[in-house]
Image (tube, rainbow, N blue to C red):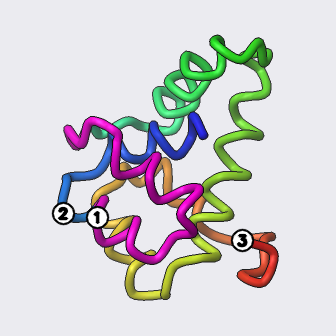
Amino acid sequence: MSAAATLGETLTGGEAEDVAAQLPDELAWVLEDADHDGAGYDRGAFVDRVGEHLRDIDVEPDDAEQFAEAVTDAVAAALTGGEVRDLMSQLDDDLHPLFEDVTVHPDQL
């Protein structure tokens, strides 16, 4: 859930609540519990931060990109199109590709 926590850090509290309201409980609480400081990470910083979160569970930092893509795919699949646009409006443009070409179907959540 490190990518979800990192995503939560990039959002303001109100947007994090809006996103969490559309997510399965397993993802929603992680997003809601993050420090919502609107961190403004670019893609490199976002993936590095995910890697920092993953150190505690003994995952290789090189795998952080895959974790970030998997979680953002799940988030994007769960959200309405309008909410994805709202979420992306708070993110650095470098992060937008993480929410495009989603490979997860909402039924898989």
Q: Residue at x 44, y 52 (%)?
A: 29
Q: Residues within 10 Å of mark 1 (few under 14, many from 20)?
A: some
Q: Name the image quarter holding the C terminus.
A: bottom right
Q: Give the magenta range.
A: 16-38
Residue sitting nearer the eye, 100 or 66: 66
Mark 1 = which residue? 17
Type of amino acid at the residue the image marks with label 2: Gly
* Marks 2,1: beta carbons within 8 A: yes
Figure quadrant of residue 83? bottom left
Type of amino acid at the residue the image marks with label 1: Glu
Above or below — where is 64 with respect to 7? above
User: Residue 71: image x %, image y %?
Assistant: 65, 52
Q: Which of the two discs, 1 and 3, sits closer to the camera?
A: 1
Q: Secondary structure at mark 1?
A: helix
Q: Residues within 10 Å of mark 3 (few under 14, many from 20)?
A: some
Q: Residue at x 77, y 20 (%)?
A: 62
Mark 3 = which residue? 102
User: Residue 107: image x %, image y %?
Assistant: 78, 83
Q: Secondary structure at mark 3?
A: loop
Cα gap from disc 2 to disc 1, whole angstroms: 5 Å
User: Residue 6: image x %, image y %?
Assistant: 45, 37
Q: Main secondary structure of the magenta part?
A: helix
User: Residue 44: image x %, image y %?
Assistant: 53, 29
Type of amino acid at the residue the image marks with label 3: Val
Of callouts 1 and 3, the N-terminal one: 1
Above or below — where is 55 with respect to 76? above
Above or below — where is 65 with respect to 100? above
Q: Which of the two discs, 3 and 2, sits closer to the camera?
A: 2
Tag shown at residue 14: 2
Tag shown at residue 96: none
Query: Viewed as shown, does residue 23 lie left or right of 87?
Result: right
